[in-house]
Image: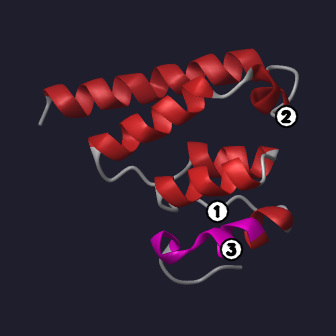
Amino acid sequence: MMSGDPRDLDAAAVIELCAAGLVPVNVLPGVAIAVHRQMATPFTLRAVLLACTPTVEDSRTQLDYLADLPDAAWCSIGPEWQNYREASLASMRRSIAWRTVCV
């Protein structure tokens, strides 16, 4: 079990958690993306999806990265990966739009 602020985790700590079968939530988007680029697994992909999004720019970075992933990266999610991918990306787009318009 992890204690402390997940935004303080570095790439090595996130890799360690993911390798242990845990998905760290609220890590910095840049750290999660760097980890997935280094070690593409279902756990590291979920770390990108569940990274903290304190700014609209972080969300855009996250969305751009996820939208550019090849299908093979998403297949690891399971048989419903296409629905999961589209729902995740649509949710992120709505979140960005809502935070941009309502600020």
Per the rendered image, the range of residues in magenta is 6-15
The count of marks equals 3
Left or right of 62: which side holds 98? left
Q: Quadrant of residue 21?
A: bottom right
Q: Nearer the viewer, mark 3 or mark 1?
A: 3
Q: Indicate whether 37 appears above or below 72.
A: below
> Which residue type carries mark 3?
Ala
- Identify the coloring: secondary structure
Q: CA distance from mark 1 to mark 2?
A: 18 Å
Residue at image coords 48%, 53%: 29
Q: Main secondary structure of the magenta part?
A: helix
Q: Is residue 26 left or right of residue 20?
A: left
Residue highlighted by disc 2: 76
Residue 5 placement, left or right of 2: left
Amino acid type, residue under disc 1 in the picture: Pro
Q: Nearer the viewer, residue 81 or 36?
A: 36
Q: Would residue 30 be counted in the magenta stretch?
A: no
Image quadrant in which you'd find residue 34: bottom right
The correct choice, above or below, for 9 with respect to 33 in the image is below
Residue 12: mark: 3
Of labels 3 and 1, earlier in sequence is: 3
| Residue at numbered disc 1 | 24
Q: Quadrant of the C terminus?
A: top left
Residue 55 vertical position relative to residue 77 in the rendered view, above or below: below
Closer to the observer: label 3 or label 2? 3
Mark 1 burial class by Cα count in 10 Å: few <14, some 14-19, many 20+: many
> For the residue marked with disc 2, what is the amino acid?
Ser
